[in-house]
Image: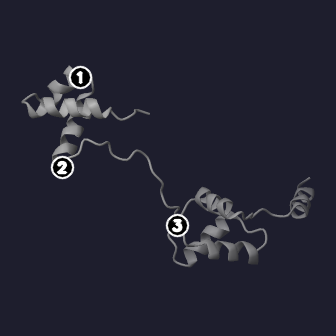
């Protein structure tokens, strides 16, 4: 992942553009990509700052706010599958989410949805 340009380099690049050089010309002169120089000059014109923007961040989980419902579903229906949880969420008007999203939500809450060992053994005995 690329790191932001140093503040010193940012200021020199912007100064060169303000003195009449093009963003591409300044980029070539300071050995940075043309797109980085163009974006920097645009940022300075829009915000007046040479500070880099935020890199990365945290996204709120899709099922945030549904913790009580997930706990209820897992507690009241032993052996419930992820697909069944998804169907129950959709029935309650929650937009469809992937099974992995549900799995991560359960993991964050410390919940399990797995069938009991005895139930799995009984199922495998019938198949053999």
Mark 2 lies on residue: 46
Q: Are marks 2 and 3 in contact (CB under 8 Å)?
A: no
Q: Residue at x 35, y 35 (%)?
A: 4
Q: How is the image coloured?
A: one colour
Kind of element beneath mark 1? loop
Mark 1 lies on residue: 30
- Return the residue found at the far front: 8
Residue 40: x percent and y percent? 23, 38
Kind of element beneath mark 2? helix
Which quarter of the rendering shows the N terminus? top left
Residue 94: x percent and y percent? 52, 73
Q: Nearer the viewer, mark 2 or mark 3?
A: 2
Q: CA distance from mark 1 to mark 3?
A: 49 Å
Q: Earlier in the sequence, mark 1 or mark 2?
A: 1
The numbered mark at residue 10 is none
Q: Residue at x 63, y 76 (%)?
A: 68
Residue 65: x percent and y percent? 55, 72
Side of 109 relative to 93 (left or right)? right
97 or 111: nearer the eye?
111
Crowd band around label 2 with a 10 angstrom C-alpha radius: few (<14), some (14–19), many (20+): few
């Amino acid at each position: 992942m690329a790191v932001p340009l140093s503040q010193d380099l940012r200021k020199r690049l912007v100064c060169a553009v303000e003195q009449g050089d093009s963003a591409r010309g300044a980029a070539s002169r300071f050995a940075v990509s043309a797109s980085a120089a163009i974006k920097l000059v645009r940022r300075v014109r829009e915000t007046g700052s040479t500070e880099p923007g935020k890199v990365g961040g945290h996204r709120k989980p899709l099922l945030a706010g549904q913790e009580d419902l997930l706990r209820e579903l897992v507690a009241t229906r032993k052996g419930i599958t992820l697909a069944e949880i998804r169907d129950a969420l959709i029935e309650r008007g929650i937009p469809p989410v992937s099974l992995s999203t549900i799995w991560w939500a359960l993991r964050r809450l410390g919940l399990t949805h797995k069938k009991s060992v005895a139930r799995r053994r009984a199922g495998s005995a019938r198949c053999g």
